[in-house]
Image: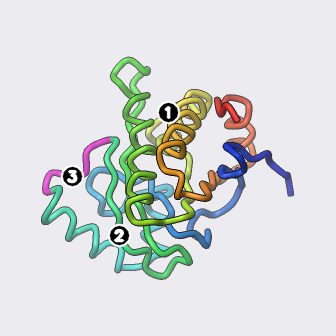
Amino acid sequence: MTAFPSFVDRRVTISVGDITREAVDAVVNAANGSLLGGGGVDGAIHRAGGPEILEACKAIRATAYPDGLPTGEAVVTAAGRMPARFVIHTVGPVYGGGMRGEAAQLGNCYRNSLEIAARRELNSVAFPAISTGVYGYPTDEAAAVSSQAIEEALGANPSIGQVRLVFFQASDAETFLRHQRFTR
């Protein structure tokens, strides 16, 4: 098993594994705007958590977001059968060349998710690599954007003790490490 460095005074750790098995206060779901499940991380979280997540997402759609969750925004539900207590759902941008505000939207996914965690007084949050799958965000660019957004959000929310960046493949973690922009 590869040992990865930590960042932001050891508050950010890197690992390779299955995000649905993370025993944290909240896992972040790289959701689609419908909040009703999908492929990749989204489908895995819905399957692992069970029907409780889908029912909570349907309630959010019926009340707060009838047209779907906008890109960069985040909402929270219970985590169902997963070891985590909550799921923070956020919608990443579909990459279109980087000229349509995708970096700001991706950064907002991380910032808004951590803001929800801070408001709920959650100490530990696990993130997947948002938008780097079927949404096509280049992993090297996503590493730079996400690391800067996470460091900024942790500076504004000192109550969050741990952010785990959980990559599905070691090669994705290594790409992240080569392109991250943490300052400490």
Q: Residue 179, position in %: x, y?
A: 67, 29
Residue 72 belongs to magenta span: no
The residue at the point 60 percent across, 34 percent down is 143
What residue range appears in magenta? 66-71
Most common SS among magenta residues: loop
Marks 2 and 1, the one that precedes in the sequence: 2
How busy is the neighbourhood of tag 1: few (under 14 within 10 Å), some, or many (20 plus)? many
Q: Residue furthest top?
A: 99
Q: Three-letter amino acid code at disc 3?
A: Gly
Q: Secondary structure at mark 3?
A: loop
Query: Front-most of 66 and 163?
Result: 163
Rendered residue at 27%/76% (across/down): 55
Give the residue at x 43% y 20%.
97
Q: Nearer the viewer, residue 124 or 144?
A: 124
Q: Amino acid at mark 1?
A: Tyr
Which residue position is annotated with label 2?
A: 77
Is 172 displayed left or right of 103 in the figure? right
Residue 67 shown in magenta: yes
Structural distance between the alpha carbons of marks 2 and 1: 26 Å
Residue 68 lies, with reference to residue 63, above or below; the image says above
Residue under circle 3?
Answer: 68
Q: In the rendered structure, which amino acid carries the disc numbered 2?
A: Thr
Q: Where residue 10 sits: x, y (%)?
A: 72, 50
In this view, 177 is above or below 158 = above
Vertical arrangement, residue 7 with respect to residue 62, above or below: above
Task: Check disc 1 and report the residue beneath it.
Answer: 137
